[in-house]
Image (tube, rainbow, N blue to C red):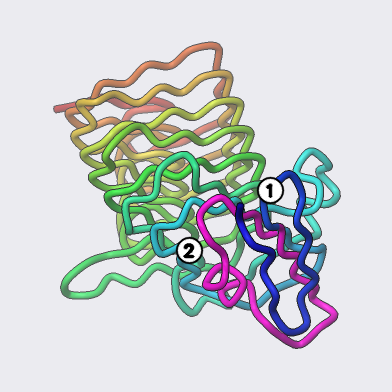
């Protein structure tokens, strides 16, 4: 049995032997991070509509579902916002999390991924050595100094699953993958929309680097993404296994090759 999470100014509910902590923006504290810290594997943290100014949220390896009150309602998703204030990455997922760690039905915006001497980070969700499930989220207006404006996954232990997400207006300022960078791992994008994302170099929306495990893009739409100086207005794939199925591409632009570019 998982215990209910008893935190000041949070409502804790025990349902079907899983603790659900509801985070309420009308209360000054605790924060989403404090709720994640108090959660145990198997728990759910439910975030009420509102705007939460937080960054570098971390699951610390726990199998926790973090979601809005109704991930299936687009109006709820749009009104449940985690805002990084262009300070740091909104999420850091780097402790071996798998698909039992879930980010669902949230809007993630204004993250900023720094390019430090020892590493570079995505602005929205930065993932390494992990493969959480990301579903029904909006990732918008996130910036990275280097690669992957909204999402970067590196050296994952399995295939990252991203479902029904909107990537809007994200920027890789001086690198590749305006919205997404996938490196040395695998990923699957199902029913996602990529719109108005921009990279200085390759992959206006998505950049793949040495993904020999394979990346699948299925039933996705790419509209008006741009690789300013290089190739692949929508997708650029370098030394990677790429499968595209049932997807549509509209008005994507690049300094070099058009919507999709693959090279070794």
| Residue 42 belongs to the span the image colors magenta | yes
**Residue at horizontal 53 percent and vertical 61 percent from the top:** 40
Residue closest to the far front: 1
Q: In the image, residue 152 lies at what x, y percent?
A: 37, 51
Q: Is residue 117 above or below residue 80?
A: below
Tell whether 22 sits left or right of 45.
right
Name the residue carrying label 2: 91
| Residue 141 belongs to the span the image colors magenta | no
Q: Which residues lie in the magenta part?
A: 20-45
Nearer to us: label 2 or label 1: 1
Q: In this orientation, which residue lies closer to the viewer: 1 or 115?
A: 1
Q: In the image, residue 215 lies at what x, y percent?
A: 35, 26
**Residue at horizontal 61 percent and vertical 63 percent from the top:** 109
Residue closest to the far left: 264
Name the residue carrying label 1: 17
Circle 2: is it few (<14), some (14-19), or many (20+) Cα within 10 Å?
A: many
Residue 46 image-quadrant placement: bottom right
Q: In the image, residue 15 lies at what x, y percent?
A: 77, 49
Residue 144 image-quadrant placement: bottom left
- Separation of residues labelled 2 and 1 (CA atoms): 27 Å
Q: In this orientation, which residue lies closer to the viewer: 35 or 207?
A: 35
Total marks placed: 2
Circle 1: is it few (<14), some (14-19), or many (20+) Cα within 10 Å?
A: few
Tell whether 224 sits left or right of 59.
right
Placement of the C terminus among the 4 image quadrants: top left
Question: Of marks 2 and 1, which one's residue comes earlier in the chain?
Answer: 1
Q: Is residue 197 above or below residue 50?
A: above
């Amino acid at each position: 049995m998982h215990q209910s999470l008893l935190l000041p100014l949070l409502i804790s509910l025990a349902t079907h032997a899983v603790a659900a902590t509801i985070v309420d923006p009308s209360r000054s504290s605790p924060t989403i991070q404090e709720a994640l810290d108090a959660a145990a594997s198997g728990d759910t943290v439910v975030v009420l509509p509102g705007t939460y100014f937080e960054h570098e949220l971390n699951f610390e390896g726990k199998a926790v579902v973090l979601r809005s009150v109704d991930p299936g309602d687009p109006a709820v998703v749009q009104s449940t916002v985690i805002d990084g204030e262009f300070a740091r990455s909104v999420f850091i997922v780097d402790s071996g999390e798998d698909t039992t760690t879930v980010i669902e039905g949230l809007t993630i915006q204004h993250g900023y991924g720094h390019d430090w001497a020892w590493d570079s980070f995505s602005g929205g969700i930065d993932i390494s050595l992990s493969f959480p499930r990301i579903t029904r989220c909006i990732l918008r207006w996130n910036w990275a100094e280097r690669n992957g404006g909204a999402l970067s996954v590196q050296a994952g232990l399995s295939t990252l699953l991203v479902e029904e997400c909107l990537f809007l207006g994200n920027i890789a300022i001086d690198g590749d993958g305006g919205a997404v960078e996938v490196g040395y791992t695998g990923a699957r994008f199902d029913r996602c929309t990529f719109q108005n994302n921009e990279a200085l170099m390759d992959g206006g929306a998505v950049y793949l680097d040495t993904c020999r495990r394979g990346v699948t893009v299925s039933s996705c739409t790419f509209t008006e993404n741009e690789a300013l100086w290089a190739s692949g207005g929508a997708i650029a794939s370098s030394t990677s296994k790429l499968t595209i199925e049932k997807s549509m591409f509209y008005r994507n632009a690049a300094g070099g090759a058009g919507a999709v570019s693959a090279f070794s």
